[in-house]
Image (cartoon, rainbow, N blue to C red):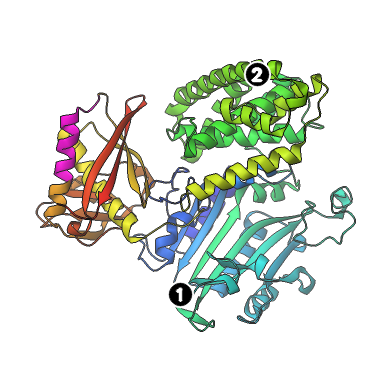
Amino acid sequence: MKSSIIRAKYLKFFERRGHAIIPAAPIVPLEDPTTLFTSSGMQPLVPYLKGQPHPMGTRLVDSQPSFRAEDIEEIGDNRHTCMFEMLGNWSLGDYFKKEQLPWFYEFVTKEVGLDPNRLHVTLFEGDESVGKDTESYEIWLSTGIAKDHIHYYPAKKNWWSRAGVPANMPPGEIGGPDSEMFYDFGPDLKLHENSAWKNEPCHVNCDCGRYMEIGNSVFMQFEKQTDGTFKPLPKQNVDFGGGLERLTAASNGDPDVFKIDMFAPIIRAIEESSRKSYVGNEAPMRVIADHLRAATFMMSEGLEPSNKMQGYVLRRLLRRAAVKARQLGGDAKTIFSQSIPAVIDNYAEAGFISASKRSHVLATADAELTKFGRALDRGLKEMDKVKSEDLNAHFVFDLFQSYGFPYEVSEELAKKKGVVLDKVEFDKVFDAHKQGSRTASAGMFKGGLADHSEVTTKLHTATHLLHKALRTVLGNEVHQAGSNITPERLRFDYTFAGKPTPDQLKEIENIVNEAIVANYPVTRRIEDKAEAIKSGAMAFFAEKYPDKVSVYIIGANPDEGWFSKELCGGPHVENTGTIGKVTIFKDESLGSGTRRIYARLSPKLA
């Protein structure tokens, strides 16, 4: 079955059961300051799972393109991908286990057509804090799942909270058991016998590839108390996530997700360019296919390769794909030029990417390949100069750091000098560097959950004031093009063809601080998106918001006039006077008519 058909069936299935279809969030988050990428369907919904009313109601469904950089080294097996599409449905204090579990069982067996005899489920076995999930056990039995296909696992496998297992949860933290569903591809494929785990017993959570997780229902059921006990929440939430790629693979009866329709055009382009078959070259072709798909998504949202943050990840994806193409004997430019349009066409049909982005994405990828070529040339010169006795993990890492020269290429050239590089030692050097980076940017790279701290909330509200001030001084051509907020500063990207003068930047800063001195109230309302926009609300990235939206109005009289009115889902202060003085300390060009402005807070307005 095609992935597009499964996606459509899923959305319709839950829409018939009272769920509002909400649009997917961008893969580069608009309003989450603590994570580089949208890594799950629930990530944009965290405020609503924590109690904030959602404009579209208590039953929601979507399909969310997601990206997890931590999986990058695992790409190459049959099921891991950095980017994936997560089918999700949520109950915000509405239905619970007895509805969720039978619904998902019905969807996979009746709509997707999976054989019920190949389905297995896992449950939380309980611990000293929270009892065994017998309720879900009885529900699964009632659907028709056989007793010997229901498996209990400890909290490490079948418990969800932001802090991990129950013992690690601080007082006030919410969490609960989850129930995962797996599809069994069967013993006939001999996946276990041919794996690294062949001498160990096979089970549903085995990594051999025989069993593939296709969905996980999380039940946010408890709040941890100060005495260490767990109290049932007054309103319990359901958070379901299922991988579209894996569901499609299961429907096709093939455990290789890279054989589904999403990846077929990319794999075909790689085969034609390299003149090699996918069979026997699966690992490098999977890396190329996965990385190009993710990179295309990022570039279509305006992300540019760079040496920082999201741009660094994008650069790494493109260059890793180029290295794998080189190792296969294929031409990276040919593979990129044939694959990127196929990715765009596939997701344009789904409404995730605009077909008009094709030329921009192709040009961005081509420019990065040219830069990478120059980096390879510089690295090759350094390799030629180094003595064999100095060709070690530290030298290779310095090449990687300075020129973006990949380890795999260093390994090829080192062999010509009679040197066998130590990959374990290189990984140690690399990991030490990454740990230093994490320490230096603590809080920035936490995955998945929004930081609603007091300082971040102030800065988030300040971006609304800054947005209005930019348009007042520079004109209505200014549109938001992205933002990122840490407790130390706000960063706001905006469209503008020129360059603001120092006097203009000072005027922008003054307008923001005058609005803060005015101590305007900040009012949140739920409005129809079309009506909100008609009334004058700024709505850049409007297509990313549902039909019912949260609108934040900053002004003395929100009914008759305002300083700012904007669609937004982030945290805000109650009055602008609590923000503190805003100081603009940097404004720079990002190219292509886009600029980036930075500002920080001072405790006092004086």
373 or 289, which is in the foreground?
A: 373
Instruction: Choose top left, top right, bottom left or bottom right for residue 303.
Output: top left
What is the secondary structure assignment of the residue under circle 2? helix
Tell me which amino acid carries mark 1: Gly
Residue drawn where x is 70% and y is 25% of the image: 409
437 or 225, which is in the foreground?
A: 437
Q: Is residue 514 magenta?
A: no
Q: Is residue 215 shown to the viewer in this render?
A: yes
Residue 64, how many percent across, how many down? 50, 49
Q: Badge 2 is on which residue?
A: 382
Tell me which amino acid carries mark 2: Glu
Q: Is residue 148 left or right of residue 34?
A: right
Q: Residues within 10 Å of mark 2 (few under 14, many from 20)?
A: few
Magenta region, residue range: 499-512
Mark 1 or 2, closer to the camera: 2
What secondary structure is the stretch in magenta mostly built from? helix
Q: Is residue 581 left or right of residue 350?
A: left
What is the secondary structure assignment of the residue under circle 1? loop
Q: Is residue 220 left or right of residue 484?
A: right
Q: Badge 1 is on which residue?
A: 172
Q: Is residue 507 magenta?
A: yes
Residue 49, how many percent across, how many down? 44, 65
Quarter containing the N terminus: top right
Q: Residues within 10 Å of mark 1 (few under 14, many from 20)?
A: few
Residue drawn where x is 70% and y is 50% of the image: 251
Tell me which label, 1 or 2, sits earlier in the chain.
1
Residue 135, how many percent across, how many down? 63, 79
73 or 284, which is in the foreground?
A: 73
